[in-house]
Image (tube, rainbow, N blue to C red):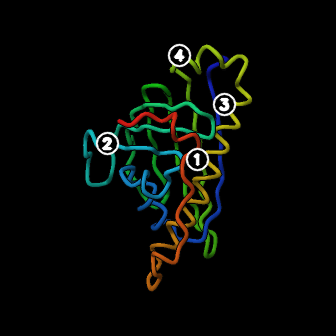
């Protein structure tokens, strides 16, 4: 593994069904609404098949650190209640795989993310800043788990969506250039 290569396995446990999780995570166009701390914008490029495979979106993301990433997310496998796979190209290049396993009233969600940094800043500084860049990823994924739990609560039948707190917003927003 090179200095600009990253491998992350994140495990979340949230109250919800695999079908609910697949519906939320499988629709990348909704990410800025419910995970705004990381997904600043998502633009559809190709709608893909009815099962979600082949869908292509351009994303603009950031973590806690004051830099942003532009990359293209392509869903490479159908979105099912067991999960799906994707590829990333752009400032990040690699693959991701979401898996969902029902465990009583909760779903265990695993995200296996294997990417190489292509953005010049990250590529050039990875040898030195890899621990900080890794911590940035872990921060972003923790916000994702928190935001997903809020989105699941918001979608529950009989819940007043206004009674559910808003998800956390992006840090250092002034460094994020609008699209």
The disc, 2 or 1, on the residue closer to the chain's N-terminal end is 2
Q: CA distance from mark 1 to mark 4?
A: 25 Å
Residue under circle 1? 111
Whole-percent x and y of residue 1? 66, 20
Front: mark 1 or 3 = 3
Mark 2 is surrounded, within 10 Å at the Cα level, by few (under 14), some (14 to 19) or many (20 or more) other residues, namely: some
Whole-percent x and y of residue 101? 58, 62
The disc, 3 or 2, on the residue closer to the chain's N-terminal end is 2
Q: CA distance from mark 1 to mark 3?
A: 17 Å
Q: Quadrant of residue 57?
A: top left
Residue under circle 2? 43
Q: Quadrant of residue 77?
A: top left
Report the side of 58 relative to 146 (left or right). left
Q: Are marks 1 and 3 in contact (CB under 8 Å)?
A: no
Going 45% across and 75% down the picture, which residue do you hit?
A: 161
Residue under circle 3? 133
Mark 3 is surrounded, within 10 Å at the Cα level, by few (under 14), some (14 to 19) or many (20 or more) other residues, namely: some
Q: Which of the pair 156/97 is nearer the observer? A: 156
Residue 120 tag number: 4
Going 39% across and 43% down the picture, which residue do you hit?
A: 41
Q: Quadrant of residue 12?
A: bottom right
Report the side of 3 relative to 147 (left or right). right
Front: mark 2 or 1 = 2
């Amino acid at each position: 593994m090179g200095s600009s290569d990253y491998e992350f396995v994140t495990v979340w446990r949230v109250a919800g069904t695999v079908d609910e999780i697949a519906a939320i995570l499988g629709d990348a166009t909704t990410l800025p609404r419910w995970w705004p701390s990381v997904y600043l914008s998502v633009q559809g490029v190709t709608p893909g098949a009815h099962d979600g495979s082949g869908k292509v979106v351009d994303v603009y993301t950031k973590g806690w650190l004051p830099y942003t990433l532009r990359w293209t997310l392509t869903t490479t496998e159908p979105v099912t209640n067991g999960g799906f796979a994707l590829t990333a190209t752009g400032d990040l290049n690699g693959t991701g795989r979401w898996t969902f396993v029902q465990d009583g009233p909760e779903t265990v969600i695993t995200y296996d993310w294997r990417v190489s940094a292509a953005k010049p800043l990250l590529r050039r500084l990875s040898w030195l800043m890899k621990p900080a860049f890794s911590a940035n990823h872990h921060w972003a994924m923790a916000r994702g788990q928190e935001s997903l739990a809020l989105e699941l609560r918001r979608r529950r039948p009989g819940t007043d969506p206004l009674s559910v707190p808003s998800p956390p917003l992006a840090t250092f927003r002034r460094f994020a250039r609008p699209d």
